[in-house]
Amino acid sequence: MKPLGTVISTEESPTTQEFSFVLEEGAPVKKNQFIQTASEEGTVFGLVREITRANRYFERAESVAEYEKESSISTHFPVKSWEYAIGEVRILGLMNKVGDKYRHWRVSLPPSPGAKVLPADEQMLNDFIGFQPDGLMLGKLQNHDVQAKVSMTRLLQKHLAILAMSGAGKSHLASVMLEELLDRKKEDGRISVVVIDIHGEYIGFKSDPKYGKQVRIVEGKSISVPFSNLNPELLGTLFPDMTGPARVELGKILKQMAEDSKQNNTVYGMQDLIARVETAGMNKNTKDSLMRPLYELLSMRLIHPTRKNPNLYELRPGEMLILDLSDLDDQKRKKAIVTLIASRLFKLRRKGSIPPFMLLVEEAHNFAPERSKSVHTPSKFVIEKIAREGRKFGAALCVVSQRPVQLSTTTLSQCNTHVILRVTNPNDLDHIRQSSEGLDDRTMRSITSLKVGEGIIVGEAINYPAFVEIRDRKSRKMEKGEPLHLQAIKFDSDQQKKEEEEDDEIEAFLD
Ligand SMILES: Nc1ncnc2c1ncn2[C@@H]1O[C@H](COP(=O)(O)OP(=O)(O)OP(=O)(O)O)[C@@H](O)[C@H]1O
Ligand SMILES: [Mg+2]
């Protein structure tokens, strides 16, 4: 391998923590690139944190200014040949091979000045970062020809948060991850995926020739719980402030209705329940505390006399259920759906009735907001519960948010892996810094200069924070909602048509 440069001796380095090297002319060294060099302890592994360039001819401001007045300095001197570049390296450890894998050790001696600096060996890099051959291929490691293959278990078991500003590529990354999950072979372990799709961004999977068969879409409007499943516990999950006595009364009435339903062979709905509560003899306060949630539930149209949609028992490993909520306007209804689906998934999973799953929640700050009590946002309670307890049961959470500051800190801190794409808002950056371990100042600065589709993975999934370039999608991208300019053209031409028709009508009338 061609050397990239040579370790130099400066006042501060080399130490056991850092060293500098002078770059060979034209060496393809980049910031945030991994390198290696040899010491008597073995192979020292490090990361180029910064590159500086220097040139003796340009060191003294007054002489540069003086020369440049007449003509360029370069016409008088061979300035180019005096330019050199220095790479500053942070030492990350020793990497020595044990068996067929590289192991990581602490450095106790610095590399010697004069030692050659080489590009990091590919296998060493994989072993250092902790990429795995059978992992989810999310893209490539920045500055290296190494595929970013992240272990599914390490990425998801202790939950994942995808954080970035709007348009940075969060949903794109989520789609790439979904492809990888759908592509998994049975023998590698396949999970079910449930997607809370707020904007109808994932529906393209259904019409994709490769993935379509593994995907089912349920539209928000058709999501319903059959009346026979309604019980005090379910209502209590949706309306946590319902009082104990109200639950007891509800339990009694529902029990009676179930018996009547069996006896008379009739099906009941919300209206029947409300009518029965209205005429039932009970304390007025209890009745009031029961009527409000019942009316709210009625207006959400979530309870259907018989229909159960989706039937979560039908979840299969290697398949994906997309709940397309883009047809709903009512925020409360969306939150109620997320609450019901998430709590039911968790319950069924705990009983072992459904496969291990990942629940992907887009716009997670709306469903698990930091500044809202569970009473107003019952989904927050359920999401936090899965975040805290899910890993024992194979219930994984992937939260996606462009407003990390507004996302529940409990949820965020339980997400042991964060993928952070471009973020520029200082508040969001601060918040991310506090909730993600292993991010130093320099790395934080790099996050603001990421391009769309570039990000950093930190946390449980890998051994060391890694900048990655997310790969292209393989699946069909299809979004609800046409681009703005097409909507504008359509509106204009519709308007014109309407006016012409009106003109025709007037003319016909005048004729
Ligand atoms: N790695 C990538 N390669 C190619 N295109 C990408 C990549 N990442 C994102 N894009 C494109 O950039 C655009 C924005 O990406 P995306 O919709 O994923 O952003 P987002 O972070 O989910 O935004 P929002 O917060 O608005 O939901 C899309 O057109 C997407 O196809
Ligand atoms: Mg998005």
Image (cartoon, grey):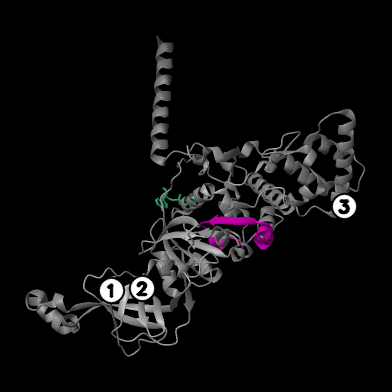
Using the image, determine if residue 96 lies above or below residue 130: below
Q: CA distance from mark 3 to mark 1?
A: 75 Å
Q: Residue 13, position in %: x, y? A: 35, 87
Q: Which residue, given by chain and number where applicable, does mark 2 sit on?
A: 35
Instruction: Inspect the magenta stretch and tell me whether residue 396 lies in it.
Output: yes
Kindly identify the residue that appears in the image at 74 percent across and 39 percent down: 298
Q: What residue span does the magenta drawing correspond to?
A: 385-408
Asked if residue 444 lies left or right of residue 52, the reply is right
Of marks 2 and 3, which one's residue comes earlier in the chain? 2
Q: CA distance from mark 2 to mark 3?
A: 67 Å
Q: Which residue, given by chain and number where applicable, does mark 1 sit on?
A: 4
The front one of 172 and 394 is 394
Asked if residue 460 lies left or right of residue 86, the reply is right
- Location of the N terminus by quadrant is bottom left
Q: CA distance from mark 1 to mark 2?
A: 9 Å
Instruction: State the residue lying farthest toward the bottom.
Output: 11
Task: Say if disc 3 is inside 8 Å of ligand 2.
Answer: no
Near mark 2 (Cα within 10 A), the count class, few <14, some 14-19 or many ≥20, is: many
Near mark 3 (Cα within 10 A), the count class, few <14, some 14-19 or many ≥20, is: some
Q: Which residue, given by chain and number where applicable, does mark 3 sit on?
A: 245
Q: Contact, CB < 8 Å: mark 1 with mark 2?
A: yes
Q: Nearer the viewer, mark 2 or mark 3?
A: 2
